[in-house]
Image (cartoon, rainbow, N blue to C red):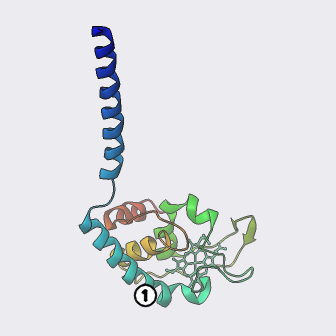
Amino acid sequence: MKNNMIRGLALLLTIFIISCSGKGGENKEMSHSENVKLEQYMVTGSKLYTIHCSSCHQSEGQGLAKLFPPLSGSDYLDNNLEAVPCIIKNGLSGEITVNGVVYNQPMPAIPQLTNLEIAEITTYIYNSWGRNHGIVEVKDVEKMLENCKK
Ligand code: HEC
């Protein structure tokens, strides 16, 4: 009788712990102010993308033939977040492979962009076309820019 009660209590405790750890996951969701900030970055990032990127990479990031690689669905983008602020600021040249296709056309530098604008554009392309990375903060962009390959 007593043993059964202990077993029952242990079971209840286990259920309690499991349901609590489930709640813990929910708490990781973004706070309201983070959501507002992400939305602001997305709105400005989208405008900046249209001005500075879409003439080559196209409005839906689909790229253009063998001239301009895609950003939407790009494995290069997925694997190289650290390099993207550098590419935006300093341009890129030499052969690169995106989704198995080789590209080799220089992308011009856009040196006039501020670090905030680069963070907004980076946030935009990492949260569009099926991506859901969350905000890319200015302080992270600053660190990435310090580490650009010369
Ligand atoms: C004048 C055309 C042009 C513009 C404007 C341009 N790009 Fe590019 N971009 C290219 C080309 C060409 C490459 C491939 C470079 C190479 O072959 O080395 C490239 C490569 C890239 C890559 C790496 C490959 C990939 O597809 O994942 C990223 C990321 C990228 N561009 C982002 C941007 C963003 C963001 C902007 C706007 C801020 C931008 N580009 C503006 C032409 C352009």
Indicate which quadrant contains ligand 1.
bottom right
Instruction: Please state which of residues 22 and 3 is positioned toward the viewer in this rendering.
Output: 3
Residue 114's place in the image compared with 32, above or below, is: below
Question: In the image, is 108 to the left or to the right of 23?
Answer: right
Q: Which residue is mark 1?
A: 47
Measured as percent of width and height from the top left, residue 31 is found at: 27, 62
Q: Quadrant of residue 99?
A: bottom right
Instruction: Please state which of residues 24 and 63 is positioned toward the viewer in this rendering.
Output: 24
Question: In the image, is 46 to the left or to the right of 64?
Answer: left
Callout 1: 10 Å neighbours few (<14), some, many (20+)? some
Instruction: Please state which of residues 137 and 43 is positioned toward the viewer in this rendering.
Output: 43
Q: Quadrant of the N terminus?
A: top left
Can you see residue 77? yes
Task: Check disc 1 and report its element: helix, strand or loop.
Answer: helix
Most extreme residue toward the front is 1
Tell me which residue sits at (38%, 66%) in the image. 135
The three-letter amino acid code for the residue at tag 1 is Lys
Residue 44's place in the image compared with 10, above or below, is: below
Measured as percent of width and height from the top left, residue 130 is found at: 55, 69
Question: In the image, is 34 to the left or to the right of 76?
Answer: left
